[in-house]
Image (cartoon, grey):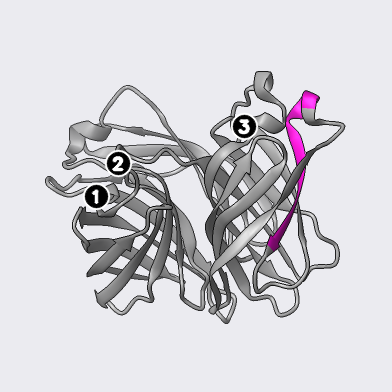
């Protein structure tokens, strides 16, 4: 992805407040997938103060609700590019993690690990938490959200899921989803109960569907970073949805730009492009790299017929 920066705020004080984040990476010791979701408290003076938490998943080995703290510092490139450095410690995890942070705005940063001695590499995004009026609680998840997560299985093959998360604001949810398990597609529903802590940490507990619990750190109403507790270390964003869709929702004069995120294995195709939606069809042009690094440019796909289902937040 590429995001527009605000150079006028390139300073330590650009990070000031509580930031929810999500990260994905790999354990270099055994190749297991890793993911983490959490939040940090930045004081604007270079300190990640106490109170921050992270839920880590190393191929199904969990470090839940671990305290996270540390410092962040100016670099020689801060004024010119918004580059900061950071040192973070996590309760239950040996050593100190060294990161590089790039400021996008006062509400958003990107980060990447730069440790040469730790056994993992990862990157991710952090978003300033803006709690709803009254703070985070059950009503912070209400109506429809869109979730997209992906992970990597033990044999190295990817597994991805997208769906609509319907929450009632009182602790009951239903997930309508499509999952692609290495070219085996499943369309189904799952459901259960959820809880939301005042710090924005939410937990989805499934009573149907067979999924492991999912942890979400919210940065606002119906949005945040989701991390499953499965062995695939599946993770991804949660974004607000709307109550109803129909074909007119997408059939506009605007173009939609797309790209793959966090590729999990060499079997994945990396792709970016642009789509335009007609009344019932979508036409796309993209550039892609196939397994093996072969570049295919300006590929024009055949038009795809689509139908948006009324009273749901899914299109097929």
Give the SS element for disc 3: strand
Label 2: state its secondary structure: loop
Q: Residue furthest front?
A: 50
**Residue annotated with mark 3:** 104
The answer to which of marks 3 and 2 sits earlier in the sequence is: 3
Nearer the observer: mark 3 or 2; the answer is 2
Depth check, front residue: 44 or 186: 44
Q: Give the mark nearest the N terminus, 2 or 1.
A: 2
In the figure, is residue 78 to the left or right of 170?
Answer: right
The residue identified by callout 1 is 139
The magenta region covers 79-89
Q: Earlier in the sequence, mark 3 or mark 1?
A: 3
Q: CA distance from mark 3 to mark 2?
A: 28 Å
Which residue matches tag 2? 134
Of circles 3 and 1, the one toward us is: 1
Residue 24: image quadrant is bottom right
Helix, strand or loop at mark 1: helix
Residue drawn at (64%, 30%) of the image: 14
**Hey, which residue is sitting farthest top in the picture?**
8
């Amino acid at each position: 992805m590429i995001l527009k920066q605000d150079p006028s705020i390139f300073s330590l004080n650009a990070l000031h407040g509580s930031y929810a984040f999500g990260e994905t990476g790999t354990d270099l010791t055994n190749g297991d997938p890793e993911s983490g979701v959490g939040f940090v408290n930045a004081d604007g003076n270079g300190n990640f103060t106490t109170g921050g938490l992270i839920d880590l998943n190393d191929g199904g080995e969990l470090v839940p609700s671990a305290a996270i703290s540390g410092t962040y510092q100016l670099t020689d490139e801060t004024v010119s590019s918004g580059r900061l450095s950071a040192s973070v410690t996590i309760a239950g995890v040996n050593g100190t993690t060294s990161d590089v942070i790039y400021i996008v705005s006062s509400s958003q940063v990107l980060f990447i690990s730069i440790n040469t001695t730790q056994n993992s590499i990862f990157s991710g995004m952090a978003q300033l938490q803006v709690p709803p009026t009254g703070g985070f609680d059950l009503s912070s998840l209400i109506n429809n959200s869109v979730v997209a997560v992906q992970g990597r299985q033990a044999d190295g093959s990817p597994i991805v899921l997208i769906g609509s998360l319907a929450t009632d604001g009182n602790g009951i949810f239903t997930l309508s989803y499509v999952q692609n398990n290495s070219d085996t597609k499943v369309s189904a529903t799952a459901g259960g109960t959820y809880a939301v802590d005042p710090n924005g940490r939410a937990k989805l507990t499934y009573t149907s569907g067979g999924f492991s619990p999912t942890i979400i750190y919210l940065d606002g109403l119906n949005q945040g970073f989701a991390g499953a507790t499965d062995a695939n270390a599946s993770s991804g964003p949660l974004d607000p949805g709307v109550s109803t869709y129909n074909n007119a929702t997408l059939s506009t004069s605007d173009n939609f730009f797309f790209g793959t995120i966090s590729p999990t294995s060499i079997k994945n195709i990396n792709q970016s492009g642009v789509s335009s939606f007609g009344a019932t069809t979508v036409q796309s042009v993209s550039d892609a790299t196939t397994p093996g690094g072969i570049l295919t440019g300006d590929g024009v796909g055949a038009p795809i017929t689509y139908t948006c289902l009324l009273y749901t937040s899914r299109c097929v």
